[in-house]
């Protein structure tokens, strides 16, 4: 799933926007696409393991819940 997303225009979590840089779309570990924003001023990326690929925790815009993002992109306007 991650390889397909990166091939189709998604970005790696290595350069995900930081706190205050706006709202973006994330591809979650479960395969959902949600609007989110970063709550941190730094990137704390979890390494790939038996549970999934490299990921970063972000906050959903609509609910405020934590999401495990594996890829991101700016929303189409």
Image: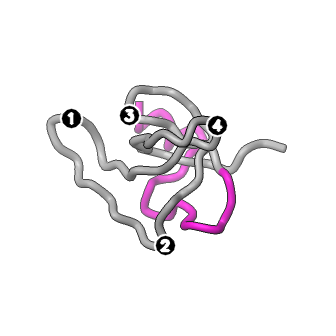
Could you tell me how far apart the alpha carbons at marks 3 and 1 are, in whole angstroms? 9 Å
User: Are the residues flagged by discs 3 and 1 in contact, CB closer than 8 Å?
Assistant: yes
- Residue 29's label in the rendered image is 3
Q: Residue at x 17, y 43 (%)?
A: 49
- Please check the rendered image and state whether residue 22 is part of the magenta-colored stretch, yes or no: yes
Could you tell me how far apart the alpha carbons at marks 2 and 3 are, in whole angstroms? 22 Å
Label count reads 4
Q: Residue furthest bottom?
A: 41
Label 3 crowd bin: few (<14), some (14–19), many (20+), radius 10 Å: many
- Residues drawn in magenta: 1-23
Q: Residue at x 45, y 26 (%)?
A: 31
- Residue 51's label in the rendered image is 1
Q: Residue furthest right?
A: 77
From the image, tell me which residue sits under label 2: 41
Nearer to us in this view, 2 or 37: 37
Q: Secondary structure at mark 2?
A: loop
Q: Quadrant of the C terminus?
A: top right
Would residue 52 be found to the left or right of residue 62 on screen? left
From the image, tell me which residue sits under label 4: 62
- Nearest to N terminus: mark 4 or mark 2: 2
- Nearest to N terminus: mark 2 or mark 3: 3
User: Are the residues flagged by discs 2 and 3 in contact, CB closer than 8 Å?
Assistant: no
């Amino acid at each position: 799933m991650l390889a397909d997303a990166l091939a189709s225009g998604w970005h790696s979590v290595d350069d995900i926007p930081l706190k205050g840089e706006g709202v973006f779309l994330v591809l979650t570990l479960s395969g959902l696409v949600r609007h989110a924003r970063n709550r941190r001023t730094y990137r704390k990326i979890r390494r790939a393991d038996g549970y999934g690929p490299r990921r970063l925790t972000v906050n959903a815009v609509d609910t405020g819940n934590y999401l495990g993002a594996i890829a991101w992109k700016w929303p189409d306007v």
